[in-house]
Amino acid sequence: QKEIQHGVDSWVSLGNRRPHLSIILVGDNPASHTYVRRKIKAAAAVGICSEIILKPKDVSQEELLDITDRLNADPRVSGILVQLPLPGFGNNTCSSYIAQ
């Protein structure tokens, strides 16, 4: 953890933008919420900014893909995590598209 924090601090001290993780969380699965809270806490501990984008379990696939497209185009976002499982539709479709 200290090594990662040092790397982030060095990166930022060189004039680079602080890393930013965007997490998309769909539905109300308690295990997913716990996992995401831990990821946010771990990111903060090493100096990485993060945000959670909460969506209801009935979010459309189109909206979810629009969100990932918007995040991909956002220069402040360094990484995107789409928390699985995605309730209501097959994970393979979104996962395959997002991996592109």
Image (cartoon, rainbow, N blue to C red):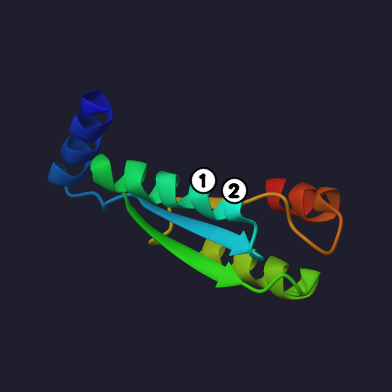
Amino acid type, callout 2: Ala
Q: How packed is label 2: few (under 14 Cα within 10 Å), some, or many (20 or more)?
A: few
Element marked by disc 2: helix
Q: Residue at coordinates 17% horizontally, 49% vertically from top-left?
A: 15
> CB atoms at circles 1 and 2 under 8 Å apart?
yes
Q: How packed is label 1: few (under 14 Cα within 10 Å), some, or many (20 or more)?
A: few
Residue extending farthest to the left is: 13
Label 1 or label 2, whichever lies nearer to me, is 2
Q: Which residue is mark 1?
A: 35
Image position of 81 (left or right of 84): left
Foreground pick, 7 / 57: 57
Foreground pick, 86 / 12: 86
Q: Position of residue 58 (x, y in %)?
A: 76, 74
Q: Position of residue 6 (x, y in %)?
A: 18, 31
**Visible residue check, residue 41:** yes
Q: Residue at coordinates 23% horizontally, 24% vertically from top-left?
A: 3
Element marked by disc 1: helix
- Above or below residue 58? Residue 6 is above
- Above or below residue 7? Residue 86 is below
Q: Residue at coordinates 27% horizontally, 51% vertically from top-left?
A: 18
Q: Position of residue 56 (x, y in %)?
A: 66, 74
Q: Which residue is mark 2?
A: 31
- Quadrant that contains the N terminus: top left
Image position of 7 (left or right of 54): left
Amino acid type, callout 1: Tyr
